[in-house]
Image: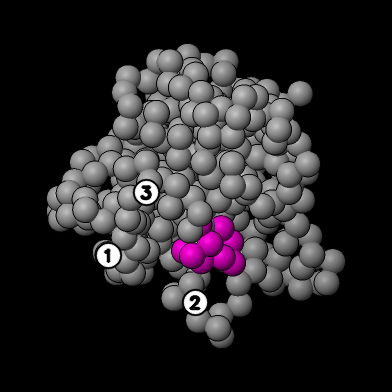
Amino acid sequence: MEISVKEKIVADVPLLEFVEQKKAETPMPTVIFYHGWKSRREGVLGHAFELAKKGFRVVCPDAYEHGERHDARTKRDLNTYYQVVQHNLMEFKPLVQAYRDQHLTDDSVGVAGVSMGAVTASMLFCYYDWIYAGVLLEGAPAPRTFTKEIYEKLIAYYEETHDTMAAAQLQATYEEVHQNLNHYDLMENPQRLANRPLLIWHGKDDPVADVRYDNEFFKKAKIYDEGKYVHAVFSEKSDHRVPYHISYLTAAFFDQTIASRPIPGRWAAVQQAMAEKFGEHPEERFHYQLDSFE
């Protein structure tokens, strides 16, 4: 299979598009895949290729102030983190609509991301009920809690350095941001899962994004009937890098939940696909646990 990789600007967003060459102009199920903080669209190449080989059109945007859009004079710090996420959120719908207008997507749309990209994907999944499936790699589906911790640390820093004006400005910004995030927070709105397939992966030794958010969300989601198709994979001895077998797992999950309907029974098919690729009991080989943190 020959995979086409094209640089494009769609709805004013620079991106890479991955798709099987002979189907490049055909309506196809589409996955929008977001990269992480201080990374760029090329940082998710491995994930994109695996998805394209499964028959998806994969769209990998450069986030605001990242990749081609980064101005070297601009300082990227935690105070600008959610400005970047906010741009991702605002640009998503026009981006999908542009692909619909060009008849390049069949309206089976999934979202995925790594780290900050996973935070973005979780927020989009919460807000747009027409997104069919999602995959979150190392990103917390709890943006309000996550944001609160970020801003509390920043405000405390400025208070300790006696920069009261900066602390007051951050406090005002935090209150506005925190209020606006309510509609995008899966942790606080688990009913918005709405029986849609969602896969979470996180390394237990991740020093960047705390795995406890995903663990808490997974346990909460499984209490609700709307969360019946939420699945989680937690890996031992894994840090903030996504290993190849998880890229393959991501592609297998989308393949089974979007390309191969109906949903019931698909998780078993995902596990079978992993076994066929990596041999029996890949969870033992790669030290991960399915649907369990303990």
Tell me which residue sits at (21%, 50%) in the image. 23
Is mark 2 in CB contact (under 8 Å) with mark 1? no
Q: Is residue 70 magenta?
A: no
Q: Earlier in the sequence, mark 3 or mark 2?
A: 3
- The answer to which of 57 and 280 lies nearer the viewer is 280
Secondary structure of the residue carrying tag 2 is loop
Label at residue 10: 1
Secondary structure of the residue carrying tag 3 is helix
Label at residue 70: 2
Residue 19, visible in the rendered structure: no
Colour scheme of the rendered structure = one colour
Residue 120 relative to residue 238: left or right: left
Q: CA distance from mark 2 to mark 1?
A: 17 Å
Under mark 2, the amino acid is: His
Position of residue 132 relative to residue 27, above or below, is above
Q: Give the magenta-colored segment's residue range.
A: 36-44
Number of residues whose C-alpha sits closer than 10 Å to that of mark 3, classed few (under 14), some (14–19) or many (20 or more):
many
Image spot of residue 121 (x, y percent): 47, 45
Image spot of residue 13 (x, y percent): 34, 66
Under mark 3, the amino acid is: Ala
Instruction: Tell me the quadrant of the picture where the C terminus can be found.
Output: top right
- The answer to which of 60 and 164 lies nearer the viewer is 60
Task: Please state which of the two labelled residues, at mark 3 or mark 2, is closer to the viewer.
Answer: 3
Image spot of residue 78 (x, y percent): 65, 63
Q: Looking at this rendering, what residue extends furthest in the right direction?
A: 160
Tell me which residue sits at (84%, 66%) in the image. 160
Label at residue 52: 3
Position of residue 260 relative to residue 113, above or below, is above
Q: Total number of numbered labels?
A: 3
Under mark 1, the amino acid is: Val
Number of residues whose C-alpha sits closer than 10 Å to that of mark 1, classed few (under 14), some (14–19) or many (20 or more):
some
